[in-house]
Image: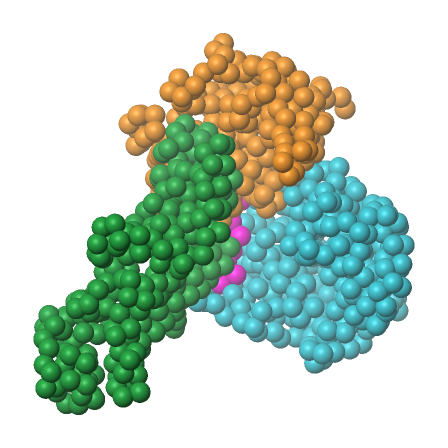
């Protein structure tokens, strides 16, 4: 069990000071990503998942208050200077954002993808471009390096973003909602595309069917907390946390059963178990915040699984 | 009840309109009273365009649309407006479906005013039926979540008692846990009001659950669904 | 209210207040007194006196009135005309849009100030000097920026889903344009109008400086600088104070406009 931990997040807390109050986007999140694995973080909007990803890359705005540790290959990223962090971004940890605005419309895609290479490795434009050509071929957009972003369809643009992300040979690739707004056929293409990336991946999404086809391990986030971590197959066969179960059951193929109630606000999150009000199986104990407990090779934050035993 | 015959729509894009995209290519379909037809297709297949053609929100280049026997393609202005009360749209993006400067009450009751129907009660009835509270009516669009806005959009679409509703990917912009709730709401209201519905989606599994019949659209052409 | 807005509005409010209270605090800008001519600022004449012995403070304050009224009139007419044309053009598109688009392009190609000067000259020549010449001449070139901006905004608003929904619900085209599209376009237009005021004031003053605008003895800042320029070494207060007020007004409007623009951007950011 001495697998190599590439990324460890320990007790991460992120708060935003806004006019409306203090937004507790991430409340004490801990998890680890092993080298070579495909880790998918599932959460709906308002769960804090994007903030979590941005926190790892230290790309949060100034009004964010951070706490906890993010350890990448043994180094605590929060202790690094901005200069050192910049060397990590793109080169060690890559970020594949949601499609649209990430591409500069006035530069050719070849140049944009080569930029990280020129920037991080000091490569000359010609050598960087030849490396990019190979990556483009690999990803199925070969020969199009001289074109501009608007000449690509949405799905193809996604491949350009992937190329840009992996060009500098990062160890960890973080992808944010790669299938947002895409239909089923394109979603499968993204799965294929991502499978080709032979790197450790952390994908943030709310697309359960993408996760089902792509993930090795899954973590579920709700209201700023991780409520379940599990190997993918076990998760989809039998989710542990009532919220996970609710999510799966709301899929059309599994009954289209809605989860009652509404997501709590991150400004004044409820005390105790945050899913309590919407949970069919809640009981008195749920007034206290449940800890993340181990159940075999899985983790759950729910009193139903107190101390590793089923309640 | 709704029938499209040989519908064709071509869009011109690019500089000087050089590029032609055939969005809908000779499509014919019928939707009977009270029937739900699910239209499945990937993005770019023309399904949204087809929905809008059936509602006459855009004019077809070729072909005709019949609504309860009336040829909509020939109608203009006031006659078309009268029929609009009987066919409605539930859009894809609830956050952009309302005038951001209007309170929800004004937006939801607007169709009543436009068609000269005086029925305040109906607004409150529908608000309850879609699962919103009266206090939501006083708010502005940016103060509500996607799920709440979509419910409001449904209320607005149903306020004039239409007989036919086109749902254009009504859940694709919503969170997972809200999607199931909205689809169930649509199904419930459709049964209660005996609506004919065209449910447009890219999700085959959803189409299987929702539709009495499933049609597949690909590059502007339509075909029946085979498993 | 952010800081820019605050500073800008304070400046403008002060100047406007001065202008409104002119009859009460600024005495008579026309009264000449050759015995008191070219006196530097003193207790009796806080801004000094000009070459005809008139109180500069009085003339500057009354000039504020003149300038503001003229500038606002010009802006209002330009905005009304420009926004309407731009909105119709953008919303209905087609031939109308093509035609109006070309007209806008032609006007944009004209060097504004030169054209203003020429037009004022022609009008004065044909109809004699009048404030309305100034107004007309400037409106003719000023409406275009409103038209262009409005057209752009309307074009993008037209594509928004709520406009489609309005159509689906049965609203007519003019109804949608007047009750939904234009109200949503107002924001950026207000910003434009505020920033534009600075330009208008400068143009009015420039025309005045060239002797083409509002004629003496009616006090107007640009024209005061013109008559004061001969005495710039001996009596600099003649040019200084009108110049200062021009600068302050333009600054005030610019700050207010920038502040409004910031406020609007922030609002749409928060809403997301």
> For this view, does C233 lie left or right of residue C195?
left
Q: Is residue C104 above or below residue A165?
A: above
State the count of labels.
0
Counting from the top left corner in percent of width and height, residue B220 is at 68, 25
Inspect this view and state whether residue A68 appears. yes
Q: Is residue A78 above or below residue C120?
A: below
Report the chain shown in cyan: A
* Image point (37%, 33%), residue name: C174
Report the chain shown in orange: B
Inspect this view and state whether residue B200 appears. no
Counting from the top left corner in percent of width and height, residue A240 is at 70, 51
Counting from the top left corner in percent of width and height, residue B203 is at 68, 34
Residue C259, image quadrant: bottom left
Counting from the top left corner in percent of width and height, residue C54 is at 14, 78
* Image point (21%, 89%), residue name: C40
* Image point (57%, 21%), residue name: B60
Magenta span? A260-267
> For this view, does B12 lie left or right of residue A174?
left
Per the picture, the main secondary structure of the magenta-coloured stretch is loop
Q: Nearer the viewer, residue A8 or A273?
A: A8
* Image point (42%, 52%), residue name: C145
């Amino acid at each position: 069990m001495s697998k190599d931990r590439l990324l460890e997040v320990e007790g991460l807390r992120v708060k935003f000071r806004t006019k409306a109050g203090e937004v507790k986007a991430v409340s004490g999140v801990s998890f680890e990503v092993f080298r070579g694995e495909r880790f998918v973080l599932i959460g709906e909007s308002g769960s804090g998942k994007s903030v979590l990803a941005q926190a790892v890359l230290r790309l949060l705005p100034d009004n964010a208050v951070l706490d906890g540790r993010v350890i990448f290959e043994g180094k605590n990223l929060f202790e690094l200077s901005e200069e050192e962090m910049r060397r990590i971004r793109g080169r060690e940890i890559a970020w594949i954002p949601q499609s649209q605005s990430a591409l500069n419309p006035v530069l050719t895609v070849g140049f944009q993808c080569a930029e990280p290479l020129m920037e991080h490795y000091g490569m000359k434009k010609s050598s960087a471009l030849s490396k990019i050509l190979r990556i483009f071929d690999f990803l199925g957009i070969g020969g199009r390096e001289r074109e501009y972003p608007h000449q690509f369809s949405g799905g193809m643009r996604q491949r350009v973003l992937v190329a840009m992300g992996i060009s500098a040979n990062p160890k960890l690739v973080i992808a944010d909602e790669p299938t947002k707004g895409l239909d089923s056929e394109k979603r499968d293409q993204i799965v294929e595309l991502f499978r080709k990336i032979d790197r450790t991946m952390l994908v943030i999404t709310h697309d359960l069917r993408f996760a089902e086809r792509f993930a090795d391990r899954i973590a579920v986030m709700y209201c700023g907390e991780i409520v379940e971590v599990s190997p993918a197959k076990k998760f989809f066969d039998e989710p542990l946390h009532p919220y996970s179960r609710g999510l799966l059951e709301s899929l059309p193929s599994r009954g289209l059963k809605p989860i009652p109630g509404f997501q709590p606000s991150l400004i004044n999150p409820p005390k105790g178990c945050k899913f309590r009000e919407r949970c069919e199986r809640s009981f008195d104990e749920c007034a206290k915040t449940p800890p993340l407990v181990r159940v075999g090779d899985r983790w759950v934050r729910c009193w139903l699984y107190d101390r590793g035993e089923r309640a | 009840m709704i029938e499209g015959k040989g519908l064709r729509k071509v869009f011109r894009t690019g500089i000087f309109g050089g590029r032609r995209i055939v969005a809908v290519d000779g499509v014919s379909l019928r939707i009977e009273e009270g029937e739900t037809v699910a239209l499945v297709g990937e993005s770019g297949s023309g399904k949204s365009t087809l929905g809008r053609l059936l509602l006459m929100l855009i004019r077809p280049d070729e072909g005709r649309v019949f609504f309860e026997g009336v040829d909509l393609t020939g109608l203009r202005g006031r006659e078309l407006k009268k029929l609009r009360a009987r066919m409605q749209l539930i859009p894809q993006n609830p956050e952009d479906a309302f005038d951001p400067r209007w309170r929800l009450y004004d937006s939801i009751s607007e169709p009543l005013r436009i068609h000269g129907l005086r029925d305040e009660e109906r607004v409150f009835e529908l608000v309850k039926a879609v699962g919103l509270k009266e206090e939501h009516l006083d708010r502005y669009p940016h103060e509500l979540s996607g799920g709440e806005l979509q419910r409001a959009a449904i209320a607005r679409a149903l306020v004039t008692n239409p007989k036919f509703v086109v749902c254009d990917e009504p859940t694709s912009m919503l969170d997972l846990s809200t999607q199931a709730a909205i689809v169930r709401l649509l199904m419930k209201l459709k049964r209660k009001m005996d609506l004919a519905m065209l449910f447009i989606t890219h999700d085959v599994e959803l189409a299987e659950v929702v539709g009495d019949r499933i049609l597949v659209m690909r590059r502007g052409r339509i075909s029946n669904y085979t498993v | 209210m952010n800081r820019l807005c605050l500073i800008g509005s304070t400046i403008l409010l002060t100047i406007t207040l001065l202008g409104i209270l002119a009859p009460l605090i600024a005495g008579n800008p026309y009264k000449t007194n050759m015995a008191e001519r070219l006196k530097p600022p003193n207790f009796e004449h806080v801004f000094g006196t000009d070459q005809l012995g008139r109180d500069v403070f009085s003339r500057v304050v009354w000039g504020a009135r003149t300038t503001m009224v003229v500038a606002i009139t010009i802006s209002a007419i330009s905005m009304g005309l420009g926004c309407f044309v731009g909105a119709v053009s953008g919303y209905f598109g087609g031939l109308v849009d093509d035609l109006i688009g070309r007209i806008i392009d032609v006007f944009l190609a004209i060097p504004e100030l030169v054209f203003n000067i020429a037009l004022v000259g022609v009008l004065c020549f044909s109809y004699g000097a009048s404030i309305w010449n100034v107004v007309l001449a400037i409106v003719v070139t000023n409406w275009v920026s409103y038209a262009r901006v409005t057209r752009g905004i309307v074009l993008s608003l037209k594509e928004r889903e709520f406009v489609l929904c309005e159509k689906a619900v049965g609203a007519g085209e003019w109804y949608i344009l007047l009750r939904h599209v234009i109200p949503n376009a107002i924001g950026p237009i207000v910003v434009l109008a505020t920033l534009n005021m600075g330009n208008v004031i400068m143009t009015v003053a420039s025309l005045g400086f060239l002797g083409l605008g509002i004629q003496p003895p009616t006090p107007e800042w640009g024209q005061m600088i013109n008559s004061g320029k001969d005495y710039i070494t001996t009596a600099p207060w003649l040019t200084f104070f009108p110049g200062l007020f021009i600068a302050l007004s333009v600054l005030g409007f610019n700050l207010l406009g920038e502040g409004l623009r910031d406020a609007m951007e922030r609002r749409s950011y928060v809403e997301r």
